[in-house]
Amino acid sequence: MDLVKAYKKSIALFFVFVFLVSCNKKESQAPPPIPAPFITVVAKDVPIYKEFAAQTFGDLDIVLTARVDGILTGIHFTEGQKVKKGQLLYTIDPLEYETKVEQVKGQVATSQSNFVNAEEELKRIRPLVDMNAVSKREYDAAVAKSKAARSNLESTQAALRNQQLERSYCNIMSPIDGVIGISNARVGDYISRMGNSSKLNTVSRLDKVRVRFTISEAEFLEYRKKKSLSKNSNENDIELLLSDGSVHPYKGVLNFSDAKIDPTTGTMTIETTFPNPENNLRSGQFSKVRALIENQRNAIAIPQKAVTELQGIYQVLVIDNENKIQVRIVEVGTKVGEDWVITKGINAGDKVAITGSMFIQPGSVVTPVPYTSEQNKGK
């Protein structure tokens, strides 16, 4: 019996020993603190931009419109190339208009002859009136005939100028230095001064381009309010973002804003002007305008990766002096690139952990590691 009790006691002691050894082993194998990337919050000036869908227009976009009817007999330019002011672009068959000019020239010659005869007759009668050799009625008739002949001459001369003007419309010249587009007509087409066939082409002056975009009524009021408070004249910078993601190398300036809000859309049209000395921009391009709305002074901005949102509540993880993770509820402002402006909840000097590891939880002890953004890794 004593032997059995001794055996049970030894078994119990063995298990106690094994349990203590295993506990000590687990304690010796406790994992080290998890590395936690962090950034130290710094107050700085943060420019706030907004982007708007936009469309480009030439500084001048002049539609070439036919002013006479006829067959198109010549195209004297290369589509898409530069043209000079006064350069011949199109010719319309002038035969009909040249014939009319010659007809009216004949009428002018007849009127001229009639006027000369009337003047000569008046010159002969005038001395005879002083000598009472002719009646007053004959003299008045001669004066009236001279005036009528003069009026007829002036009328036919005006008709000649009009016909010569119509003849000149057969030659369509470039009104400006610019770039000409694709022709809407080909040689042999019948051109009419009425309807769509009258619009032959467009010449655009592109040393500058106009860019138009729309903003909402609320955005306009917000912008005006912030501009009235701003004292920095450099906050007028406007950039043009092209469809390939590149940025136009020249800054734009505000040209004008519409005088009214469109009641059907609740928006206002804004126009800006951008230099375009290399003619890289063309009329009709779709792009984006990025405008500097304000420059927030001493703002707090942290990477968007550091902010989590749950049911409209935003929070960040802060590393305290004991390297423990603490949760902070924050209020967010505008997104700026990869960052997010924080309006309330953290202060300059706080260490904010960049979330992304499921093991970084509130209350856990971490090893702080300076965070390097994706933009700076390659530098």
Image: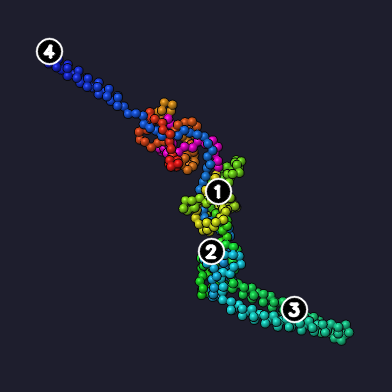
Picture coordinates of residue 227, whole percent (x, y): 59, 43
Q: Which residue is mark 4?
A: 2
**Magenta span: chief secondary structure:** strand
Picture coordinates of residue 206, whole percent (x, y): 56, 58
At 55% across and 44% down in the image, what residue appears?
Answer: 293
Label 4 crowding class (10 Å Cα cut-off): few <14, some 14-19, many 20+?
few
The label nearer to you, 3 versus 2, is 2
Occupied quadrant, residue 129: bottom right
16 shown above or below 44 = above
Q: How many marks?
A: 4
Label 1: element kind: strand
Label 2: element kind: loop
Residue 61 visible, this angle: no
What stretch of residues is rendered in magenta? Answer: 294-319
Please state, as top left, top right, bottom left or bottom right, where the N terminus lies in the image: top left
Q: CA distance from mark 2 to mark 1?
A: 29 Å
Label 3: element kind: helix
Label 3 crowding class (10 Å Cα cut-off): few <14, some 14-19, many 20+?
some
Q: Which residue is mark 1?
A: 238
The label nearer to you, 2 versus 4, is 2
Q: Is residue 295 magenta?
A: yes
